[in-house]
Amino acid sequence: MFPKPAPFLQTNTYAYESSPMVKATGFREYDARWLFEKEINLMGVQALGLGLGTLLAEMGVAPEIVTGHDFRSYSASIKLALVTGLMAAGVRVHDIGLALSPMAYFAQFALDVPAVAMVTASHNDNGWTGVKMGAQRPVTFGPDEMGRLKEIVLSGSYRYADGGSYRFVEDFPSVYINDLTTRAPIKRKLKVVVACGNGTAGAFAPKVIEKLGCEIVPLDTDLDYTFPHYNPNPEDLHMLHAMADKVRETGADLGLGFDGDGDRCGVVDNHGEEIFADKIGVMLARDLSKLHPQSTFVVDVKSTGLFATDPELLKQEVKADYWKTGHSYIKRRVTDLKALAGFEKSGHFFFNAPVGRGYDDGIVTAIHVLDMLDRNPDKSMSDLYQALPKTWGSPTMSPHCDDEKKYDVVEKVVDRFKEMQAKGDLFTGQKIRDLVTVNGVRVTTEDGTWGLVRASSNKPELVVVVESPVSETRMRDMFAAVDGVLRENPGIGAYNQTI
């Protein structure tokens, strides 16, 4: 019998090599993330595979799964440890090798396999690993499935079965690339900076965009798991600034940036101005709603208020549904509501039938951006951006807060804002007009200025976002006030970036 995991083992010891180690906090709301060797070891990953195979049987899902791994020095080893556990649980494994997360989701359809387990730490720093899992395409696990998986793994309640097998799917990337490029080319002559941060997308994104008829300017597309310049994270200002500089240097029409596992896309315009992903979402919603009026768009609570107030979207009778942040939450909500698309400020975009398969794919997002430009041949990316009503918004800002403390802190912040609203207290000199508490708290004042506080689902951090339709001053006032409420609680560290 495979041993029950320990929460901590000292490296370079007999116990570390002979027992599984799995830290409980690695099971997040909608995927799993650990610091490899410090919070999980290879035997711990085997335990995860055994647990996942057990869960599939419990859910009544056929014991068949797609696996892939991102480009990090240790990801292949982790995937093979996961495969060992899955096979012990009787699961038939289809391994597509080095891949993007959306390539693994696509493989569920292309290979007609019910489940997926993609080994990736996404945009997290080197040292992190994780797994994105699903068993009901196109959605991935949410809190219920992750909670049950955590129980199975940590208790060692495994179900062993015969019949497990392993098959390597040769050259699967060509199937994925052909699926994206077997279509009419982009008519407009576009020069595109393709930025990959030396992450996995560098092996695939440039090929796709070039095959569609664009001239590409590669930026950090060589695979290098040390990430020598910056983390592949198009929400991070370091990456956005590098993209902006390259656009200005080369006179490109736009820059497209992809995160470490290729399920997110960031954009800078032809002037090298960074456009936050939620504003890109509004632009795409404008474009798609002309083709599909009266559509529903699901939007995460970190995103701009324009989805509900933009005159062009209102003209097309668009419905905006603000929902919980997180790729699994938005993906499931898009599926449940049969929405046309879902947008997250982080750059996860979900295009549903008839414009996609419902999962998040950064390259598919890039293609939709290019198609939008193609349908507006007399307008630049900047023109389309400037046509939006003006708001002043922040990037996603994350102060450190331990995994063991962050949810308690957010609960206290929610209660504090509820108390202020109930008493009629002023916040930033105005009454609180609205509180949205589906995911942390989004507080909106009378003039439409708002601030959000929530717990990060994949890092020991909180998440803070602010926006004002009035002025930059009001945006900064909101940030100062929200930060003040946050720091009434001990254990709040420095921000990764601020306005």
Image: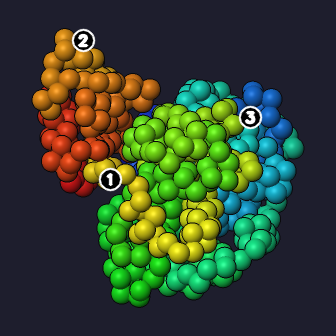
Q: Secondary structure at mark 2?
A: helix
At horizontal 36% and vertical 36% (from top left) the residue drawn is 455
Q: Earlier in the sequence, mark 2 or mark 3?
A: 3
Decide: is 171 above or below 121: below
At horizontal 33% and vertical 79% (from top left) the residue drawn is 245
Q: Disc 1 or disc 2, which is closer to the eye?
A: 1
Q: Classify mark 2: residues with Cα within 10 Å, few (<14), some (14-19) or many (20+).
A: few
Give the residue pinned by disc 2: 422
Q: Disc 3 or disc 1, which is closer to the eye?
A: 1
Residue 179 percent location from the top left of the image: 77, 66
Q: Who is closer to the viewer here, 485 or 6?
A: 485
Q: CA distance from mark 1 to mark 2?
A: 31 Å
Amino acid under label 2? Ala
Q: Quadrant of the C terminus?
A: bottom left
Q: Is residue 124 left or right of residue 441?
A: right
Give the residue pinned by disc 3: 56
Quarter of the image holding residue 69?
bottom right
Give the residue pinned by disc 1: 390
Q: Secondary structure at mark 1?
A: loop
Decide: is 171 above or below 78: below
